[in-house]
Structure formats: structure tokens, C-alpha cells
Image (tube, helix red, strand yellow):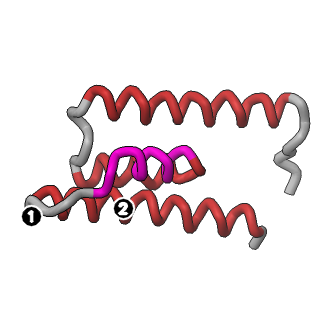
Amino acid sequence: MSILFCYFLIVNFLGFTSTGYDKFLARRRKRRIPEKTLLSIAAFGGSIGSGIGMLIFRHKTSKRSYLLKFWGIIILHIVVLYLLFTNEIISLKL
């Protein structure tokens, strides 16, 4: 397993669990994980885990400002991956 794959596995797990834990804290009316932290995890590669966590835990799905920032991160990831693959910096050869 490559280091990059392990990194994305860990950061997506972190995104998923932090979204679920923030929902848990919200229900208990405790001090929450800042949105900046949740978005940073998504920006550093945990967008898939964070997105799945948002859907499963039904968390942050109606907050428009958060969703705009989250989808901005997703679009940025797609653009970067497109540029990396089209310029053959990364290849899909196995």
C-alpha cells in the first residue's frame, strides 16, 4: 500500500469521525468542533469522508455557508486532479 493511499484513508476516516463527533456534541449542547477545523480536514483530502459523514449523520446539511465552502473544496479537488491527470503528472497505470 502506498503512503499516499494510507494518508487519504486516514484523513477521510478523520473527516468522517469528526463530523459524527461534532453531531454528537451538538445534540448534547456541548462545545463544538469549529467549522474551520472541519473544513480544513476536508481541504487536506478528507472531503469524501466528511461528505459521507454529513449524509449519514445528517450534519451541516442545511447550513448554506458551510455547504458553499465545502462544495468549493470539492470543486477545487476535482480541478486539481483533472490538471494532474491531463498533464500526466499522475497516471492510472497499475
**Above-or-below relation of 42 to 30:** above
**Above-or-below relation of 44 to 27:** above
Helix, strand or loop at label 1? It is loop
Q: Which residue is mark 1?
A: 28
Pick the residue in front: 39 or 81. Answer: 39
Q: Which residue is mark 2?
A: 18
In the displayed orientation, state which residue is furthest to the bottom.
1
In-image side of 9 versus 53 (left or right): right
Name the amino acid, label 1. Arg
Look at the image and say whether residue 4 sits in the magenta stretch. Answer: no
Q: Position of residue 16 (x, y in %)?
A: 40, 59
Q: Are marks 1 and 2 in contact (CB under 8 Å)?
A: no
In the displayed orientation, state which residue is furthest to the left.
28
In-image side of 89 versus 39 (left or right): right
Name the amino acid, label 2. Ser
Identified at 84% across, 29% down, the residue is 86
Q: Position of residue 23 (x, y in %)?
A: 21, 57
Q: Position of residue 25 (x, y in %)?
A: 18, 62
Identified at 75% across, 68% down, the residue is 3
In-image side of 27 versus 67 (left or right): left
Which stretch appears magenta? Answer: 33-43
